[in-house]
Image (spheres, grey):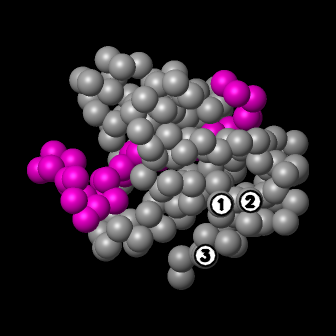
Amino acid sequence: MTKSVESLAEELGGLLRARGWVVGTAESCTGGMVAAAITDVAGSSGWFDEGLVTYANRSKQRLLGVSERQLAEQGAVSQCVVEAMAEGVLASGADISVATSGIAGPGGGTPVKPVGSVWFAWATKGGVESECVHFSGDRQQVRLEATRYAITGVLNHLKQLDLG
């Protein structure tokens, strides 16, 4: 059974609190849903740094340092852009960050980047990792599953750090 977004956010809070870390988010297709899920947890002000919704490309550039060249050559829904987003929010003071950029639909997809394609990146001072996942369903389902995946990814990265 898949854990609810709420239980994942609560688990995340516990791990961050135990580590003394704060998380930051940079979101495009999820439109702040990751930050909202995290801040729905009581006490999240102790482990949540900031959440940026950078839906427009100019916001990605201005707030996160994504280059115009990356956006022009690869598009907003790409590995290099989502990694730059994660690194941009990390630079603001978070210990770990997550970024999302995708095509939630119903329009906007292409054969190369179909509706449901979402790029994720997770960054710490030790580096950045990214992954593209394809979700099915309507716009709300894609955004909800992307939110769940983003938080699960932060949890997995923290658990790997604790094992290492």
- Seen at 22% across and 53% down, the residue is 108
| Neighbours of disc 3 within 10 Å: few (<14), some (14-19), many (20+) | few
Q: Which residue is mark 1?
A: 36
The x, y position of residue 154, in whole percent, is: 62, 50
Q: Give the residue furthest to the left.
A: 111
Disc number at residue 4?
3
Question: Which one is nearer the viewer's eye here, 66 or 122?
Answer: 66
The x, y position of residue 98, in whole percent, is: 58, 43
Could you tell whether 3 is left or right of 60 in the image? right
- Residue 20, quarter of the rendered image: top right
Report the magenta stretch's main SS: loop
Magenta-colored stretch includes residue 101:
yes
Q: Which residue is mark 2?
A: 39
Amino acid type for the residue under numbered disc 1: Ala
Element under disc 1: helix
Whether residue 83 is visible to the viewer of this picture, yes or no, is: no
Could you tell whether 107 is left or right of 137 in the image? left
In the image, the segment drawn in magenta is 91-120
